[in-house]
Amino acid sequence: MAVTIWEVAWQLRGMEELFQDFVDSPELAANLLDRITEVRCGQARFFASNDADVLILGDDVSMQTGMMMSPATWRQWFKGRMRRIIGEARAIRPDLPVFYHSDGNPAAIIPDLIEIGVTILNPVQPECIDPIEVKRLYGDRLALWGTIGTQTTMPFCTPQQVRDEVKRRIDTVGGGGGLVLGPTHSLEPDVPWENIVALYDAIEEFGSYG
């Protein structure tokens, strides 16, 4: 369910058209989003009833420079619907971890995500959001999943630099727990094999709490 509401809706309707609907045809937009939400609520109940380890939700609502839409627009159209999906799962499994994915910099809505029940944020791209700052602000309520850059560290650093980055993340963002360390996205063909080996070797070496 990592593509939950927004991305499904704009792929069906068209992104520009859906943004226009928010202004000119709000009833049409609401009907579309509500129908998608109903389907997702059913899936959330199914996963929660069948011992899923984590409920994976998300939509790319942010870009490298910030939100794709205003936080107010996200709150109006998506916050309540995402809350409902999480609520359906938590009614069955109150302790179910909830993972939310958005590429880019969703800093403006992180408090909202926590409020509606998100407990894991992914991918925390270091190219556009500071994992250390996110940890400082929200680390008591939110686990971070990712944090190793696939636009910088993995393709362009040396193996030693990759190792250094892994250790730095564990020493800073990993303090007190709450870090699932890994690349922020799929590794592309330009990533040297030596860097992949260095990543996993460093995680094995440094990735434990003493």
Image (cartoon, rainbow, N blue to C red):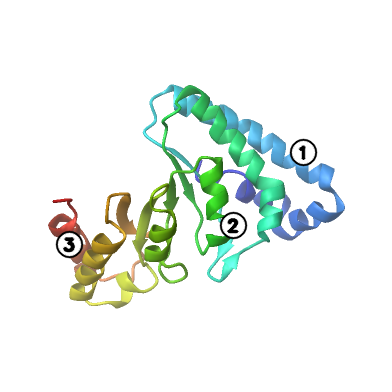
- Tell me what residue is drawn at x 17 percent, y 50 percent: 209
From what the image shows, is residue 178 above or below residue 84? Answer: below
Specify which label sits upstream in the sequence, 3 or 1: 1
Label 3 – label 2 distance at C-alpha:
32 Å
- Could you tell whether 128 is left or right of 87 in the image? left
Please name the amino acid that badge 1 sits on.
Asn
Q: Tell us which disc is closer to us: 2 or 1.
A: 2
- Tell me what residue is drawn at x 55 percent, y 44 percent: 115
- Could you tell whether 5 is left or right of 207 in the image? right
Camera sees residue 60: yes
Helix, strand or loop at label 2? It is: loop
Foreground pick, 185 / 78: 78
Which numbered dot is residue 61? 2
Helix, strand or loop at label 3? It is: helix
Q: Which residue is mark 1?
A: 31
Specify which label sits upstream in the sequence, 3 or 2: 2
Residue 8 position within the rendered picture, expressed as x and y whole percent measured from the top left: 62, 46
Residue 89 position within the rendered picture, expressed as x and y whole percent measured from the top left: 51, 29
Q: Which residue is mark 3?
A: 202
- Tell me what residue is drawn at x 41 percent, y 30 percent: 95
